Image (spheres, rainbow, N blue to C red):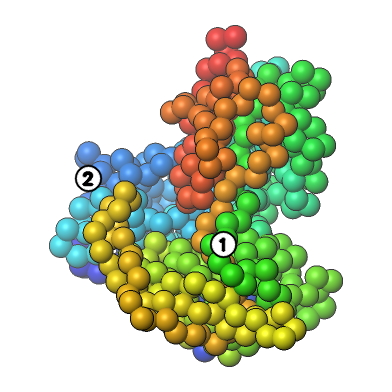
């Protein structure tokens, strides 16, 4: 019998008063009974509107139908035809803005919980180990993938399944890119990321860490000396931006990139950490995206008495996922909306002691379609803080573009690539944040998959 409930199965989660002081995962996941019950809400629409908004084109109704039957391994097989990182996507993709936004059930109620079902299926597979991936027969061609974040992993996964000899080059000491250095453990446990990477290794992907392409080896050397017939650049956008306001050089000011990398990758939250981080008591986080939410929630878990999000627009314009905002509020994060910093204040020891802000109001829409914030006259105020984390965006690292001849880039640093991922250099492809600037995991994966198809076409035609 179909389930005609207007509401989706709620996601079980840990109590806010407990989880706000540790890094264990917040969401607990569905039980088998909950997953089957939720799957029965799907109408299995013939035209599959949900698929049209999935950047990697997962056959959503088909996998949900298998879940409704209790065939979780069959559901996993369907998902992984298109998505090589289902346990990751089930946790961090903004489904409410993508596949679930097109769900017919959402017209008169809540959409089917597509992301939560994907997470359940991936976790069930990983727990039961029902199938062991095996390498495909090699086709004799070599491809290099620069960066082991979501774009690189998706590209490598699709290519190795076609028989390519794929080597993944990662600048840091662990593979995973933003999945390991940017997204906190309580949202995406690193053991899950490692499982996904291990699956790619089992398929035949070679992973080389501590390889800074552009420094250790150049793109030209990979192609001319190492024998790679094509290169995909998925190196992300790891260069932090600042607001260029007074006081940003004070002790106690972090970019969100540095703060999260030290917490997530270097485990600075542990008492025995070799790279401890300053445990501030009054933290201000500037920005309103998922990165800002991650930084604020990490600061709370490090022992802060108060953490405040400072964002220049209203709650309606917050770019962060609604679920992340709700979790942050449940954990005691405060929101200072329609406020914009103009100066970071320091004491006699050049340490942060506050942040001067002005109140904003929304005017006419800007180029992005959002109402432009404008300053309210005579509205300055000071927010007490001994740490400020700037989460106002990132840009691609300029190292690759500065060491690669004839690689066309945009004025802000992104690599120029067409709809197939082709750059101005023959045989060199790019995608994800290195091209678009900071975006979502699933959009980066979609770019990686598109580039993999283009690389396959290029090498076969060549």
Specify the quadrant that holds the C terminus: top right
225 shown above or below 403: above
Residue 222 drawn at (x, y percent): 76, 25
Left or right, 168 with reference to 94: right
Left or right, 393 with reference to 238: left
Near mark 2 (Cα within 10 A), the count class, few <14, some 14-19 or many ≥20, is few
Residue 19 drawn at (x, y percent): 56, 82
Residue labelled with disc 1: 244
Q: Nearer the viewer, residue 22 or 444?
A: 444
Q: How many marks?
A: 2
365 shown above or below 9: above
- Foreground mark, 1 or 2, reads 1
SS for dot 1: loop
Left or right, 62 with reference to 240: left
- Give the spatial CA distance, label 1 vs label 2: 51 Å
Residue 372 drawn at (x, y percent): 31, 60
Left or right, 200 with reference to 173: left
SS for dot 2: loop
Residue 310 drawn at (x, y percent): 46, 75
* Residue furthest out toward the front: 378
- Residue drawn where x is 68% and y is 24% of the image: 405
Residue labelled with disc 2: 45
- Residue drawn where x is 46% and y is 44% of the image: 443
Q: Nearer the viewer, residue 89 or 443?
A: 443
- Residue drawn where x is 36% and y is 81% of the image: 378
Q: Is residue 361 visible?
A: yes
* Residue furthest out toward the left: 108
Specify the quadrant that holds the N terminus: bottom left
268 shown above or below 103: below
């Amino acid at each position: 019998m179909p389930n005609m409930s207007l509401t989706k199965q709620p996601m079980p989660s840990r109590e806010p008063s407990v989880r706000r002081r540790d890094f264990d995962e917040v969401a607990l996941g569905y039980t088998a009974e909950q997953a089957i019950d939720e799957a029965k809400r799907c109408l299995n629409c013939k035209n599959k509107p949900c698929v049209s908004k999935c950047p990697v084109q997962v056959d959503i109704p088909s996998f949900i139908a298998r879940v409704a039957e209790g065939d979780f391994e069959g559901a996993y097989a369907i998902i992984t035809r298109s998505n090589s990182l289902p346990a990751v996507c089930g946790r961090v993709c903004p489904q409410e803005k993508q596949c679930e936004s097109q769900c017919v059930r959402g017209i008169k109620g809540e959409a089917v919980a597509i992301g939560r079902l994907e997470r359940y299926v991936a976790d069930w597979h990983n727990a039961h180990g029902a199938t062991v991936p095996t390498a495909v027969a090699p086709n004799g061609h070599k491809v290099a993938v620069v960066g082991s974040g979501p774009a690189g992993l998706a590209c490598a996964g699709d290519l190795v399944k076609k028989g390519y000899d794929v080597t993944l080059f990662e600048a840091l000491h662990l593979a995973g890119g933003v999945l390991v250095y940017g997204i906190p453990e309580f949202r995406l446990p690193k053991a899950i990321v490692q499982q996904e990477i291990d699956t790619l290794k089992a398929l035949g992907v070679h992973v080389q860490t501590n390889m800074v392409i552009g420094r250790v080896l150049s793109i030209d050397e990979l192609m001319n000396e190492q024998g790679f017939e094509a290169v995909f650049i998925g190196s992300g956008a790891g260069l932090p931006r600042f607001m260029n306001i007074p006081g940003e050089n004070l002790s106690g000011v972090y970019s969100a990139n540095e703060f999260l990398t030290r917490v997530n990758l270097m485990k600075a939250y542990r008492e025995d950490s070799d790279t401890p981080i300053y445990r501030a008591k009054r933290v201000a986080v500037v920005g309103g995206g998922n990165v800002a939410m991650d930084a604020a929630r990490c600061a709370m878990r490090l022992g802060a008495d108060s953490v405040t999000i400072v964002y220049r627009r209203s709650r309606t314009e917050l770019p962060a996922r609604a679920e992340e905002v709700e979790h942050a509020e449940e954990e005691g994060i405060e929101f200072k909306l329609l406020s914009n910093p103009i100066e970071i204040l320091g004491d006699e020891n050049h340490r942060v002691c506050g942040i001067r802000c002005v109140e904003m109001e929304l005017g006419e829409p800007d180029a992005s379609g959002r109402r432009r914030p404008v300053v309210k006259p005579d509205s300055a105020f000071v927010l007490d803080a001994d740490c400020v984390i700037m989460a106002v965006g990132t840009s691609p690292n300029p190292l690759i573009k500065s060491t690669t001849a004839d690689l066309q880039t945009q004025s802000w640093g992104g690599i120029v690539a067409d709809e197939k991922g082709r750059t101005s250099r023959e045989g060199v492809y790019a995608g994800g944040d290195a091209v678009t600037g900071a975006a979502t995991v699933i959009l980066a994966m979609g770019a990686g998959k598109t580039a993999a198809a283009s690389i396959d076409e290029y090498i076969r035609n060549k």
